[in-house]
Image: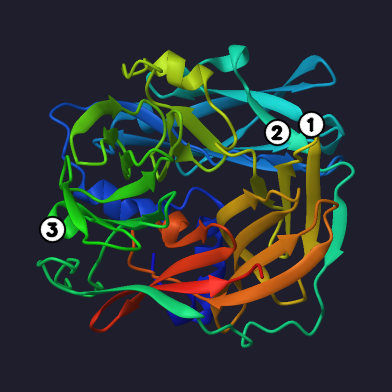
Amino acid sequence: MPSLSRLPLQRRAAVAGLVAGVLVGSLAGAIARAPAPTRPARARILHAAPVLAVPGAPVDLRFVPICEPVESPACDLRAATLHVRSAGAWTAVPGTVEGGEATFRVPGELVTEAGFAYHAELTSATGATFPYPPSGARHPIAVASTAGFRRVALPADLSLDELRSPDATELFLPWGSGPGEVGRTRPGRGADPLGPSSFAVGPSGEIAVADWVNGRVAVFPRRGPSRELPLPERTTVDVAVAPDGRIGLVGLGLGARAWELAPDGRRLGSYPLALGAPARVAAGDDLRAMVAPGQWVPVRSPGGEPLAPAEQDAGRAASPTGGRSQDLGEDRFAAAWASPGGGTVGVLVDLPPGMNVGLDYFVQPLGDGGALVARGLWDDTRMAVGVFRFSARGELLDLSLLPEPSTRMDARFSTVRFAPPGAVLAAYDRPDGLAIERFEVIA
């Protein structure tokens, strides 16, 4: 997706809609580079699931079928019904089908202080009805309520011109194919070149860079020589590092796979993704992929066996860490995280007039019960990253405004990362290479 600050004014609203939805623009490049299927694929549904909702306020939902080839009648929607569970009862909500998409409005009276859950049934021109999520009423998508969240209003004079400078350059990698360098594609007609698709921070502070152009993952420890691990498939990927040093990868776009590598590069597993269009990966005791905003699925069993589509669907969760963030319109967002003592801490953040909500980078719970929340922010002149530090009671302790990160990494969610114990790293394209800059946000 191109930088919002470089777009004409009349196009910014349209781009903001994609940012708040399923990031179709970011996925398009990854889909285009994915191997073409040998036979027509079954329709897949792209759907950005909300994770938080304001009680009494209606919620709009959008479902987009994607087929190969695109002319397949499986993608020609003719009817759609949403089933909403609220206050212990199911209610059918009719949808609107237009332009190949299905949209719904969940009435405010169904959005209670206890939240709600839902699943959709979409019917194509062939007469086939397919559910989303595939498990239907057995494992509906759950939406939590913002009831009891602390209200936080940002100062009216807050300006995105007041950006922080980095405290240090954590890593600089020149463009190239040699050791200590990263690849960049040649610019196509009317298109910018692409560089690494993602980076991640490991438990010892090492940085892993998905250098897909050169077919490798480059790992740079804080001390000592770097190492290169062969990429299982030469495609754009998101990367994550587990506490024990394992590397998790997921291809971006439709028909992608996830992989797990040992710290020395040995392939531990390869796992097909059955839902959505993967955009992010998390590596911990298990391996999870974000197949759409608000939908993380496990991809393997504890023994390392690939999970069947039904098992992936049954294990779906809103977040791998317990931290969640949700845009609630152009100028407001909510965030929630688990308290160490049990329960949930939540905030409703109102932005100043003219400022809008952008990408959801992370919600990182902290040991003191508070959290760091990194969200994209934009106005008519520029984009930035707001790093909010909240207390265990939801009080805003600090706000740092960071420059807009790389717009050439396909894994746009992962251009900003938390680096324990109290820093944020962000990736920036430079004429001569890729810089990963460090911003200290907790003293």
Q: Amino acid at mark 1?
A: Gly
Residue 302 % position (x, y): 41, 18
Residue 66 falls left or right of residue 230: right
Q: Amino acid at mark 2?
A: Val
Q: Which residue is mark 3?
A: 214
Q: Which residue is mark 1?
A: 115
- Residue 256, compared with residue 237, is above or below; it is above
Q: Secondary structure at mark 2?
A: strand
- Residue 141, compared with residue 156, is above or below; it is above
Residue 127 shows in this picture: no
Determine the residue positioned at 53% across, 35% down.
Answer: 295
Contact (CB < 8 A) between labels 3 and 2?
no
First along the sequence among labels 1 and 2:
1
Determine the residue positioned at 46% across, 39% down.
Answer: 290
For this orientation, the residue located farthest to the front is 224
Q: Which of 158 and 57 lies nearest the eye of the viewer?
A: 158
For this orientation, the residue located farthest to the top is 138
Q: Which residue is mark 2?
A: 143
* Neighbourhood count class around disc 2 (C-alpha, 10 Å): few under 14, some 14–19, many 20 upward: some
Contact (CB < 8 A) between labels 1 and 2?
yes
Mark 1 and mark 2: span between their CA atoms?
6 Å
Residue 162 % position (x, y): 64, 87
Residue 331 falls left or right of residue 172: right
- Residue 133, compared with residue 4, is above or below; it is above
Q: Amino acid at mark 3?
A: Asn
Image quarter (top left, top right, bottom left or bottom right) of the C terminus = bottom right
Determine the residue positioned at 55% across, 36% down.
Answer: 320
- Residue 375, compared with residue 381, is above or below; it is above
The answer to which image quadrant residue 427 occupies is bottom left
For this orientation, the residue located farthest to the bottom is 161
Mark 3 and mark 2: span between their CA atoms?
41 Å
